[in-house]
Every structure is written in C-alpha cells, then in structure tokens.
Amino acid sequence: MKRVFGIKKETQPAPSVQDASDRINKRGESVEEKIKKLDAELARYKEQLKKTRPGPAQEAVKARAMRVLKQKRMYEGQRDMLYNQTYNLDQVSFAAEGIKDAQQTMAAMKSANKELKGMMKTVSIQDVDNLQDEMTDLMDVSNEIQETLGRSYGVPDDVDEEELMGELDALEADMEFEEGVPSYLQPDKEPDLDSELNMPSAPMGHASMPAGRANAQADELGLPAVPRASLRG
C-alpha cells in the first residue's frame, strides 16, 4: 500500500518572523567577519607598497590588493542587503506585535464593557438623585437642630444693639481712664471705719478760747496773766 499511495509527507511549520530575523543576523555576522579579514589583508598590502620600489614587485602587490578590495566591496554589498532584510523583518514583527496588543486590548475592553453593563443594571440615576435630595434635607434638619440646641437661655430677644454699643464705648473709656484696668478688676479700697461708725473727727489746729479770755494778756510762758487785784486780796 505504501508503494502504491506513498507516504504522506510531514509539513513543516512556516518559520516565524523571529526565526527568519535570527538567521539573517547570523549571515550578516559571518559576512562582517570576512570583511574584517579582508581589511587586515589590505593593511598588510599597504605596508608592502610603502616598502617596495616601483617595479614588477610593487605591481604584483597592487594586483593582489585590488583583488582583495573587490572582494571587500562584494561582501559589503551583501552585508547591506542583509541589514535591509533584517530591517524589513523588524518592521513586520513590530506590526504583528501591535496587532496582537490591539486584540488583547479589544478583548479586555469587551470584558470590561460586559461587567459595566451588569453593574449599571443595579444603579439608577433616579435613585442617585433621590438619595442626594434626601441627604440635603437631612443636613438642613441637622443644622436647624444644632442651631436650636446652641441658643442661650435668658437673653432677651429685643436687645437694642445701639444701647450695647454705647455701654461698650463707656467701658472702653473707663478702661482708658483707669490706665487700662477696668473698675471691676481694681482692688477693693479699705473701708473708713470712722465714717461707718459716725464718730466725730479729732480736732485739728488750735482750740478756740472763750470770749472773756480772748482779750486777756499772756505772760512770758504764754499763760494768761493773773490780775493784780486778785494778788492784793
């Protein structure tokens, strides 16, 4: 049977872009090594031309140098062609990687879109608006409660602001008069016990003499003089 129908040949997979690029790079490296060897040979011939005199020997060296130079030009052309092929393969590889990245991005976006649609079914914009309105009302009520609890007791509602400003100005004037110390912060003065007990004050100055003695003469010591009639008796 195998002789009649033959054996099915195994098909090899097509080489990838990376495999082709690696193979071309290897060929380029091989050509580059050959060019370096030719450069070394040309340098040797150059030294020989400097040392030899014009004649048959120098012409032979020039012929060998020309042959090596032609080989170098050929290898350089092959190297440039291989580099161009590598550049084209790199461009193809970059484009292929970009397509793969785009496919993965599209798959991720489709999955995210499906999940987002499922989540949006549980959320309604009307519910969000209602929730915001309720939160606003609750905050207003909370502020009113705080204001009510923060009121001061015993403060009349009909307080005249102008009267309060007048008292404040008077308090400031009092503070300036007392060198910056309010009267309610000054130390208490000592009480006057005499005034509280209504006692008479002590006499001040010379005591007044009776009218009859006012015209009497005084002696050397300042005492009233004794009448002479009384001395005779």
Image: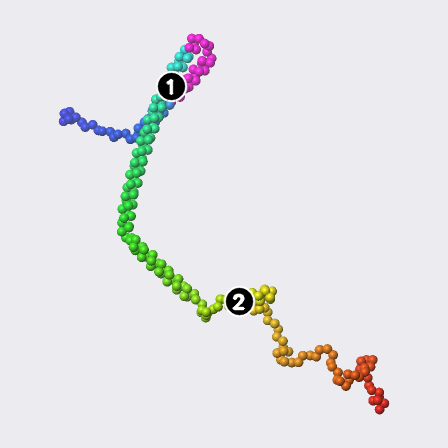
Q: Residues within 10 Å of mark 1 (few under 14, many from 20)?
A: many
* Image location of residue 169, percent across then percent down: 54, 65
Q: Nearest the camera: 213 or 24? A: 213
The secondary structure that dominates the magenta segment is helix
Query: Going 33% across and 59% down the picture, which residue do you hit?
Result: 134
Q: Is residue 69 visible?
A: yes
- Circle 2: element type: helix
In this image, 189 relative to 20: left or right? right
Residue 55 in the magenta stretch? The answer is yes
Specify the segment rendered in magenta: 33-59
Residue 72 image label: 1
98, above or below 146, in the image? above
Q: Nearest the camera: 172 or 181? A: 172
Question: Where, by quadrant of the figure, is residue 147 drawn?
Answer: bottom left
Question: Where, by quadrant of the figure, is residue 212 drawn?
Answer: bottom right
* Image location of residue 122, percent across then percent down: 28, 53
Question: Where, by quadrant of the figure, is residue 176 drawn?
Answer: bottom right
Amino acid, disc 1 = Lys
Residue 200 image label: none
